[in-house]
Image (spheres, helix red, strand yellow):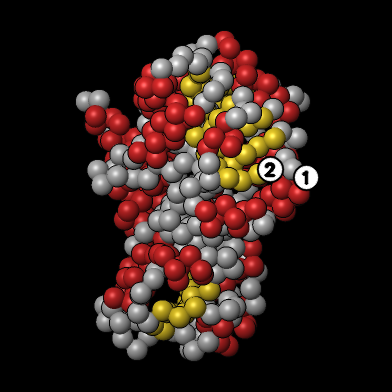
Amino acid sequence: MNITVVGTGYVGLVTGTCFSEMGNKVTCIDIDQKKVEALKNGIIPIYEPGLEPLVKKNVELGNLSFSTAIKDGLENSEVAFIAVGTPMGDDGSADLQYVLAVAKQIGEVMTKPLVVIDKSTVPIGTADKVKATIKEALAKRGVDIEFHVVSNPEFLKEGAAVNDFMKPDRVVVGAETEAAFKVMRKLYATFTHNHDRLIEMDVRSAEMTKYAANAMLATKISFMNEIANICEKVGADANKVRIGIGSDNRIGYSFIYPGAGYGGSCFPKDVKALKKIAEENGYKAKLITSVEEVNDTQKFVISNKVIARFGEDLSGYTFGIWGLSFKPGTDDMREAPAIYVIKELVKRGAKVKAYDPKAMHEAQEFYLKGVDNLDYVTSKYQALENADAMILLTEWKEFRSPDFMEIKSLLKSPIVFDGRNQYGVFEIEKEGFEYYQIGKA
């Protein structure tokens, strides 16, 4: 099939590349000329395992191309994905200006029947707005061209997005007509032919499914973090509790690891947006509100442990940070716990040395730009040289089995704050460390 994908961010680039890998002809559109030129040369703007070689391969094969002109893609395309950002507005709602701007452009340049697919995470009712916007643009041109608007939310995990797209556990499609469903079945046939994982529903239910899925996962995280906080108060061990409840197959082990809170591009934004959607429709989402409140508090748990150990005035202390991205396998720092921990420490006079395998550029240029007393180093052990304590905030694989004797020799005192409960108490305490984790006093 001939496919146009508007937006070359995380969702758009993965979507376009994976469709091209299956032999489709894909044109990815972005308004950023420098970004488009870089992509043409196989240089991608994000870190996602396995994505860069697929981009280079399919550009060379002629299956994947990039342009700044939406008309270049729509001339031959049967479907057009809208995969632009929906940033959070000041009131917590999703900002649809970019989605609707693309819809307007589509209406202004389309010349033949088209299936328009909302891939961006959008509030319930967005497809109706996209449809109305395209109709209005067509009317201004004085033309009547058949089109369908479909909701096809993404469920990609950063760090495993390519595999998630290639081997989806489900493909949710919301449409109004059998003609649209038929096109979507054809579009995803190569990804679902072994197992029929395409779930068809109405448009609004598909839009809601994305928010509901992310809110459910965020709820599990906040629930376990709250249990961990209670465990500290009553003398229980949250990791043992996790094993005890995770063995129940109705609960499972996914997303019940105590930690320093969730971050990233989806959970924080989507939880806020769902709460706002409920409010706009006259319903107070008490559970969703509590999920957000627990997570907001959880971001400060590690810095509070450091302050409790060293005091409010951290002048003269240096802390070595392992991990900046909100999770391993990505350079994404949006709402990462490291942002909050580092700012709390330096605000009290501390110096911080930080290391992350992929996210240091993001930290320096955007999320921690201008933060004083923060140095970036080139290795995990360098971050610990003459530091008063080590703080683990992202569970990268290279942090899983460190040389504890090396850590002890580098630190002024053998003190570790573990924001991801990565090291078992027995394993690290037997090495003589003063060890602080989440969920155990």
As drawn, is 17 to the left or to the right of 120?
A: right
Mark 2 burial class by Cα count in 10 Å: few <14, some 14-19, many 20+: many
- Asked which secondary structure carries label 2, the reply is strand
Residue beneath the point at 36% across and 56% down:
298
**Residue 262 in view of the camera:** yes
Crowding at dot 1, Cα within 10 Å, few <14 / some 14-19 / many 20+, comes out as few
Counting from the top left corner in percent of width and height, residue 394 is at: 52, 63
Left or right, 80 with respect to 316, comes to right
Query: Element type at marker 1?
Result: helix
Which residue is labeled 1 in the image? 61
> Closer to the camera, 401 or 157?
157
Q: Kindly indicate whether the residue at mark 1 contacts the one at mark 2 (C-beta within 8 angstroms).
A: yes
Amino acid carrying mark 1 in the image: Leu
For this orientation, the residue located farthest to the front is 142
Q: Mark 2 points at which residue?
A: 64
Q: In what quadrant of the picture does the N terminus appear?
A: top right
